[in-house]
Image: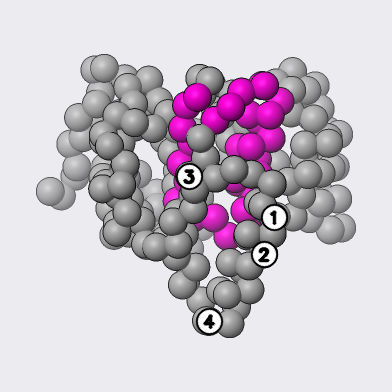
């Protein structure tokens, strides 16, 4: 069974839950195999973007083929909102020829989206964004402990109070343990929500939990 067929099969099994949020079969087909995401990851991104106000800003770190950006765009379109989209990915985490191909495919998959893309490492562009300026941040970049930890620390201040940070690959597979540990160490004072079947951790920035207490610092 292909990846898209698996997505469709999962949709059929839980369509009542998905359709209640406006997450339709057509949207899933549009995102399709552009994303290294489960249908439950797509669903959580879709729901979170629905909460971004008109004229708000969505930023993602780590783009691959553009599936998460397409998912965010489809959510904004379904809600009838105009949202500012920003993506960050240097496309340097593999063989040069392969990453050039991925970068090209990302551009093709997202050419219909009016977005600002920074083809640089996230720590090099963090000062491009004022503090308290972003409504949602989706982080799916370098999965090593240090890189994930730095992304969380660097970009948390950029998030508005009331905004949400979504950390992808919050699961205990061997490749992702660095992300899990970084989330637990950085957000020791925040509530970490792990939705049903998703590999996304959701952390909302509230007035009482804006400050970070980073374990080990």
Give the class, few, some or many, for how many residues have Cα within 10 Å of label 3's Cα (few <14, many ≥20): some
Disc on res. 105: 2
Badge 4 or badge 3: first in the primary sequence:
3
Q: Secondary structure at mark 3?
A: strand
Q: Which residue is mark 3?
A: 86
Q: Which residue is mark 4?
A: 95
> Disc 4 on helix, strand or loop?
loop
Q: Is residue 71 magenta?
A: yes
Q: For residue 167, what is the image quadrant?
A: top left
What residue sits right under mark 1 in the picture?
Answer: 109
> Residue, x 58% and y 82% (percent of image)?
97
Q: Are marks 3 and 1 in contact (CB under 8 Å)?
A: no
Cα separation, mark 3 vs mark 1, equals: 15 Å
Q: Residues within 10 Å of mark 4 (few under 14, many from 20)?
A: few
**SS class of the residue under badge 2?**
helix
CA distance for labels 3 and 2: 17 Å
Q: Which residue is at a point 51% across and 35% down the rendered structure image? A: 84
Give percent across and percent down for residue 81.
Answer: 61, 23
SS at mark 1 in the image: helix
The boundaries of the magenta stretch are 55-83
- Image coordinates for residue 164, horizontal then vertical, percent: 42, 29
Neighbourhood count class around disc 2 (C-alpha, 10 Å): few under 14, some 14–19, many 20 upward = some
Determine contact: label 3, label 2, CB under 8 Å: no
Q: Is residue 128 left or right of residue 88?
A: left
């Amino acid at each position: 069974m292909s990846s898209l067929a698996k997505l469709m099969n999962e949709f059929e099994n839980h369509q009542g839950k998905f359709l209640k949020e406006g997450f339709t079969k057509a949207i899933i087909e549009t995102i399709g195999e552009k994303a290294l995401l489960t249908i439950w990851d797509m669903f959580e991104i879709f729901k979170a973007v629905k909460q971004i106000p008109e004229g708000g800003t969505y930023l993602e770190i780590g783009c691959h083929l553009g599936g998460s950006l397409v998912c965010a765009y489809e959510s904004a379109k379904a809600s009838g909102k105009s949202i500012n989209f920003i993506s960050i990915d240097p496309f340097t985490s593999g063989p040069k020829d392969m990453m050039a191909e991925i970068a090209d495919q990302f551009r093709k998959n997202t050419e219909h989206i009016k977005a600002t893309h920074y083809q640089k490492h996230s720590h090099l562009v963090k000062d491009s964004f004022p503090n308290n300026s972003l409504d949602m941040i989706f982080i799916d970049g370098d999965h090593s402990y240090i890189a994930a930890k730095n992304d969380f620390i660097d970009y948390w201040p950029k998030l508005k109070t009331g905004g949400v940070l979504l950390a992808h690959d919050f699961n205990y597979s061997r490749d992702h343990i660095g992300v899990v540990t970084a989330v637990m160490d950085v957000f020791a004072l925040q509530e970490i929500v792990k939705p049903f079947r998703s590999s996304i951790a959701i952390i909302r920035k509230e007035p009482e939990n804006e400050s970070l207490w980073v374990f080990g610092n």
